[in-house]
Image: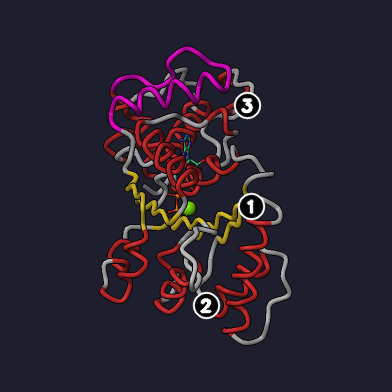
Amino acid sequence: MVEAFFGFKKTPFGDSPDPKQLFPSQAWNQVKARLQFLVDHRGAGLITGEVGSGKSTAARSFTAGLNPNLFKVMYLHWTPGSALDLLRQVALELDLEPAHFRGDLARQISQAIVRLNQSKKQHPLLICDEAQLLCHPALEQLPLLLNFDMDSSRYLTLLLVGQPLLRRTLSLQMHEPLRQRIAVQYHLEGLSREELDAHLAHQLKAAGVTQPLFDDTARQALYQATKGILRKVNKLALTALRLAAARKAHQVGEAILLDATTEAML
Ligand SMILES: Nc1ncnc2c1ncn2[C@@H]1O[C@H](COP(=O)(O)OP(=O)(O)OP(=O)(O)O)[C@@H](O)[C@H]1O
Ligand SMILES: [Mg+2]
C-alpha cells in the first residue's frame, strides 16, 4: 500500500537495509576509521551507543568488507552464560570440538588461533555483541585470549560492542587488564538535526523517490521524538508514511508525524 501510493521501488526505512542504503553519518565514518586502525594494528576495540544507534550494523557492515582470506570473523551475538560458555562458543566458531574443562578449552582455543595466523595466514577477529550482558568472569577471560604466555604477538583481535552499561562495567578495577588493552573506542550518538534531513533524503532516494515526503515541521518533530537514534528514526518515518498513505496525503506534516509517534510507541 505505502509502496504503491508513493511509488517506491523498494520499502524505505527497512530493518535490514542493504549495505549501499546505509547512511554514511559522521559517527559512522569515525567508527569505520577506528575499526580500520584496529584490524591494521590488532588488539581490542570498544563500540558503545544507545539502544538502536547502529552499533551492530556498523560492526557488521565493516567486517563484511574484510577479505575473508585474510580475516576470520567470529561474531558472538549473545553470551549471557559463564566464562566456560563464552569459551565454548569461541571454540565452536573456530570449528573445534570444545574440550570439557576450562583450562583444556583455553589451551585448545589458543592453539587454534596461533595455527590460523601461522598456517592459514588468516587473522581471527572476535566480535562480542551485546557485551554489556557478559558476566564479570567472562569479561575477565578475554584478556587471557589476547595474550598467550611467553609471547607478545597479537594473534587475536577483539571487538566489544554494547550499550552504555558496558562502559560502566569496564571502569571497574577488576577489568583493568581488559581496559588497558583497548586501543580504539567510540560512543555512537544519534544523528544530528542536519544529518537526519540527509538520512531521510538518502533513504527515499534509495527507494526511488526524490521529492521530499516530510515537510519542515514533520522533520523537526521526527528529530524531537527520536534524537536521531536510527532505529527510532526509521520506525517512525515508515509509520508516518504508512499513515499518510492511508489518509491519501502526499506529504507527511506535523499532525501525521505526531500520530505516528503514538502508533510507533515512541
Ligand atoms: N547507517 C545506517 N543507515 C541506515 N540505517 C541504519 C544505519 N545504522 C543502523 N541503521 C538501522 O538502525 C536500526 C538499528 O541498528 P542496530 O541494530 O545496528 O542498532 P544497535 O545499536 O546495535 O541496537 P541494539 O542496542 O538494540 O543492539 C537497524 O534497523 C538498522 O538497519
Ligand atoms: Mg545491536
Left or right of residue 158, residue 95 in this image: right
SS at circle 3 = loop
Q: As displayed, is residue 101 above or below residue 169?
A: below
- Of callouts 3 and 1, the N-terminal one: 3
- Of callouts 1 and 2, the N-terminal one: 1
Position of residue 28 measured from the top left corner of the image (x, y, whole percent): 41, 36
Q: Which residues are magenta?
A: 192-216
Foreground label between 1 and 2: 1
SS at circle 1 = strand
Q: Can you see residue 129?
A: yes
Cα distance between the residues tagged 3 and 1: 33 Å
Three-letter amino acid code of the residue under disc 1: Lys
Residue 173's disc is none
- Of callouts 2 and 3, the N-terminal one: 3
Q: Which corner quadrant holds the N terminus?
A: top right
Q: Considering depth in this image, is 186 or 241 the residue closer to the camera?
A: 186
Residue 81's disc is 2
Residue 10's disc is 3
Cα distance between the residues tagged 1 and 2: 24 Å
Main secondary structure of the magenta stretch: helix
Rendered residue at 30%/61% (across/down): 167
- The residue at which mark 1 appears reads as 72
Position of residue 95 measured from the top left corner of the image (x, y, whole percent): 72, 65
